[in-house]
């Protein structure tokens, strides 16, 4: 069997597999083809892939040759049109936001596996691309904020006077939020954290941050680390509590997302009026609408001296390690689909294979995506 790795469209800098991953696939009796230049932005040139045992070929040849095609993002209409019935497409395609595209691919006979739909169970942790990439995004969000913030992060006591520490507010204590806490604390900021899940309080406090509680939140224990919709009464109390913290904050990092739905608005324009000029908001939910009323995806908005950064590509600013972790996630998932002889075996009795599969046999087979189409 042949696995092909596509070069990602700009501004993406990551690649689905690095040369170090190729040796593992070769042991599985799998041949790997790499599109020319696919790893250049992740500091892996074509020569390194060849040394690892892969073939470097053109995009057209790869599409006509490979059975499984790896592409982190939607590879574009031209590539999708060139795919043949029976091809398997594996990446992160946000099918709940793109049900029409999934239907089109199903009708074309393309089998799609979308890693963002992987059931978030203990067994799936080694394949969880959302967590591995969110960890990087949380880290880079704090560093990006520190570069934009016109003051120090840590407290300084000097002969010229004292500098108070920056006040960092993090909305959402998932993987990205927890990494942002750790990074912010290492830089010397005073950190406050809000999350609707009381269960994360201990983790937050163990990292040295203050946990802001609002009682009466809906149970999110089965939401796989995501936020869930809350009651109107809770939202009202939450808004008031967040407004208090927003007014004190110098930097805010927001991470709250709900699968298949627009991200909840947690920071209103009215709340921002109380923030100091020079403050920074990094919105990691920008790709699904953002957690502020003014967020624009992949843009920076200035409002009354406040920078609101919507960035969906923070993981791509660290392409070497991001690709290394993503590639390892993909290898762990491919183990469920490839036999020791290097043959394809789609075992839909495996809950991880079934839960990640969106289309197969010319049908949309994922229940939630199918409901959105019908």
Image (spheres, rainbow, N blue to C red):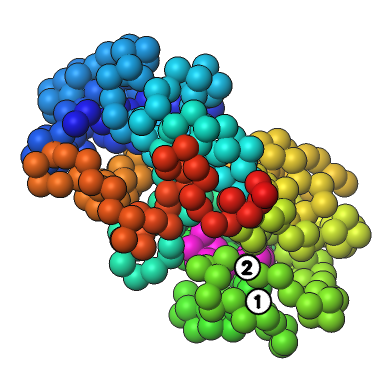
What secondary structure is marked by label 2? loop
Q: Earlier in the sequence, mark 1 or mark 2?
A: 1
**CA distance separating discs 1 and 2:** 7 Å
- The percent position of residue 174, horizontal first and vertical second, equals 53, 66
Residue under the point 27% across and 19% down: 65
Q: Residue at x 77, y 71 (%)?
A: 242
Which marked residue is nearer to the observer: mark 1 or mark 2?
Answer: 2
In what element is the residue under mark 1?
loop
Q: Are marks 1 and 2 in contact (CB under 8 Å)?
A: yes
Q: Residue at x 72, y 48 (%)?
A: 289
**Mark 2 lies on residue:** 227
**Rendered view: 306 above or below 249:** above
Q: Relative to the observer, which residue lies in front, 183 or 24?
A: 24
Q: Quadrant of the N terminus?
A: top left
Residue 136 visible in rendering: no
190 left or right of 330 in image: right
Q: Is residue 6 visible?
A: yes
Residue 67's spot in the image, x, y percent?
29, 29
């Amino acid at each position: 069997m042949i696995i092909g790795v596509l070069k990602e469209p700009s501004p993406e800098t990551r690649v689905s597999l690095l040369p170090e991953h190729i040796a593992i696939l070769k042991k599985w009796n799998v041949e790997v083809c790499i599109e020319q230049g696919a790893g250049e932005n992740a500091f892996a040139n074509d020569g390194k892939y060849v040394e690892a045992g892969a073939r470097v070929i053109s995009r057209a040849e790869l599409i006509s040759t490979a059975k499984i095609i790896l592409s982190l993002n939607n590879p574009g209409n031209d590539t999708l049109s060139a795919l043949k019935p029976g091809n398997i497409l594996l990446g992160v395609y946000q099918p709940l936001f793109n049900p029409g595209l999934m239907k089109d691919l199903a009708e074309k006979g393309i089998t799609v596996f979308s890693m963002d739909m992987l059931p978030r169970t203990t067994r799936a942790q080694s394949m969880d691309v959302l967590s591995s990439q969110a960890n990087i995004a949380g880290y880079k969000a704090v560093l990006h904020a520190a570069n934009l913030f016109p003051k120090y992060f840590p407290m300084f006591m000097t002969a010229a006077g004292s500098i108070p520490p920056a006040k960092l507010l993090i909305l959402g204590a998932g993987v990205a939020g927890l990494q942002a806490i750790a990074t912010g604390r290492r830089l010397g900021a005073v950190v406050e954290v809000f999350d609707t899940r009381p269960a994360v309080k201990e983790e937050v406090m163990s990292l040295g941050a203050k946990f802001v509680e609002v009682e009466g939140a809906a149970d999110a224990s089965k939401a796989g680390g995501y936020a869930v919709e809350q009651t109107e009464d809770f939202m009202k109390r939450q808004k008031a509590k967040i407004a208090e913290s927003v007014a004190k904050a110098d930097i805010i990092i927001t991470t709250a997302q709900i699968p298949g739905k627009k991200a909840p608005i947690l920071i209103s324009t009215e709340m921002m009026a109380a923030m100091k000029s020079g403050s920074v908001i990094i919105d990691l939910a920008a790709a699904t609408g953002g957690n502020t009323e003014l967020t624009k995806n992949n843009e920076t908005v200035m409002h009354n001296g406040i920078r609101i950064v919507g960035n969906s590509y923070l993981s791509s600013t660290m392409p070497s390690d991001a690709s290394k972790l993503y590639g390892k996630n993909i290898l762990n998932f491919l183990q469920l689909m490839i036999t020791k002889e290097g043959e394809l075996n789609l075992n839909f009795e495996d809950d991880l294979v079934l839960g990640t599969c969106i289309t197969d046999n010319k049908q949309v087979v994922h229940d939630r995506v199918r409901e959105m189409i019908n």
